[in-house]
Image (spheres, rainbow, N blue to C red):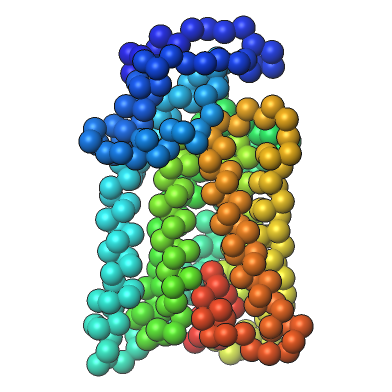
């Protein structure tokens, strides 16, 4: 910490100036990042080469963001890693074994509450993302993280943490599959998505809660409002299925989501002098969005262009892919 406090104040144009930190200051920063995993951890050596040193007035971003201190699960990545590990073990091993000689649980009423609860939460998170930046000043281009303690910046921090926490709530998607013996839905892609989202978002919240890296989170909340509304109506029973005529548009909505995420995040590679503080996060978001864009295009091609059913692992492996089994 002391090494970071010695960073000099620099005159800057538009708040950014060229600066080459000393080896002592780099060592102090690397040590501070490493403290989050433990002093013997080598993770800081993996993170450090990919982040961009940004001088005053953005030098506060060199620290782990102190504004998330005290938030649940934010003290270390270890608690979330244990939770995610337990989730993977349950949905791939313990759960199926437990249900092997048992009848599927009837969770219809619980799923109605769960699905519409996620809808309400997603609406709230969308509103918070909008009011903390995306509808109140963000340019949808080079939007950097505001590390101040202004009401707007703190509101964005809360929105980011809530989105991160919501990913743990959504682990129940897979738990419900297992308890209802819909094991065909528990594919690698499904489990991978539900595991990697909270794990990677921990780093986003801890280092960069705000800026252009939050666009995909806000967009995902909007899509979840639509998708979990569909699931909720399905859970209400056959009497409500007549209101689900828009099911065929769900894959299109998800395709649009991944296209927008990929195009938006690619901007950073074509903008000159964009001082976004953690470019590695942009690459991770782009890679993830592009991967799922390809997977959904593959699904779309087989299901709608060639008129063929896609491979089973594709149909069931999509994140929140529309399936009859979701609502049964």
Closest to the observer, 62 or 103: 62
Q: Residue at x 71, y 79 (%)?
A: 301
Q: Residue at x 69, y 27 (%)?
A: 273
**The image quarter in which residue 3 lies:** top left
Is 169 left or right of 17, judged from the image as shown? left
Is 76 left or right of 315, judged from the image as shown? left
Q: Residue at x 44, y 77 (%)?
A: 187
- Please state the horizontal and vertical placement of residue 114, each as a whole percent of the image: 46, 68
**Quarter of the image where the N terminus is located:** top left
- Please state the horizontal and vertical placement of residue 7, each as a whole percent of the image: 45, 11
- Please state the horizontal and vertical placement of residue 245, each as a whole percent of the image: 72, 82
Q: Residue furthest right?
A: 305
Closest to the observer, 90 or 155: 90
Vertical arrangement, residue 282 with respect to residue 229, above or below: above
- Please state the horizontal and vertical placement of residue 247, each as a whole percent of the image: 68, 79
Closest to the observer, 8 or 118: 8
Is 203 left or right of 70, judged from the image as shown? right
**The image quarter in which residue 295 lies:** bottom right
Residue 151: tell me if it is visible. no
Residue 187: tell me if it is visible. yes
Number of dots carrying numbers: 0
Vertical arrangement, residue 272 with respect to residue 166, above or below: above
Q: Residue at x 36, y 31 (%)?
A: 33
Q: Residue furthest front?
A: 23
Closest to the observer, 55 or 69: 55
């Amino acid at each position: 910490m002391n090494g970071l406090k010695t960073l000099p104040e620099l005159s800057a144009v538009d708040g950014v100036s060229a600066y080459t930190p000393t080896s002592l200051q780099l060592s102090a920063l690397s040590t501070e990042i490493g403290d989050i995993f433990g002093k013997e951890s080598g993770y800081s050596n993996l993170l450090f080469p990919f982040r961009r040193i940004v001088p005053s007035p953005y030098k506060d971003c060199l620290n782990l963001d102190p504004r998330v201190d005290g938030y649940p699960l934010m003290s270390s990545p270890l608690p979330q890693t244990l939770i995610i590990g337990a989730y993977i073990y349950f949905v791939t091993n313990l759960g199926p074994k437990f249900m092997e000689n048992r009848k599927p649980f009837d969770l219809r009423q619980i799923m109605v509450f769960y699905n519409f609860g996620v809808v309400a939460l997603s609406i709230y998170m969308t509103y918070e993302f909008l009011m903390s930046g995306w509808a109140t000043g963000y340019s949808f281009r080079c939007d950097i993280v505001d590390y101040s303690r202004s009401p707007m910046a703190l509101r964005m921090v809360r929105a980011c943490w809530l989105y991160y926490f919501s990913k743990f709530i959504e682990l129940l998607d897979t738990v419900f599959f297992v308890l209802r013996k819909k094991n065909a839905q528990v594919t690698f892609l499904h489990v991978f998505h539900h595991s990697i989202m909270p794990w990677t978002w921990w780093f986003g919240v801890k280092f960069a809660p705000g800026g252009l890296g939050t666009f995909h989170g806000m967009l995902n909340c909007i899509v979840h409002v639509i998708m979990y509304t569909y699931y909720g109506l399905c859970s209400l029973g056959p009497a409500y299925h007549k209101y689900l005529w828009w099911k065929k548009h769900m894959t299109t909505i998800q395709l649009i989501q991944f296209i927008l995420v990929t195009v938006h995040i690619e901007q950073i590679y074509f903008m000159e002098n964009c001082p976004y503080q953690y470019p590695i996060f942009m690459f991770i978001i782009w890679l993830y969005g592009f991967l799922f864009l390809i997977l959904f295009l593959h699904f779309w091609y087989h299901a709608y262009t060639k008129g063929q059913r896609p491979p089973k692992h594709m149909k069931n492996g999509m994140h929140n892919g529309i399936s009859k089994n979701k609502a049964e």
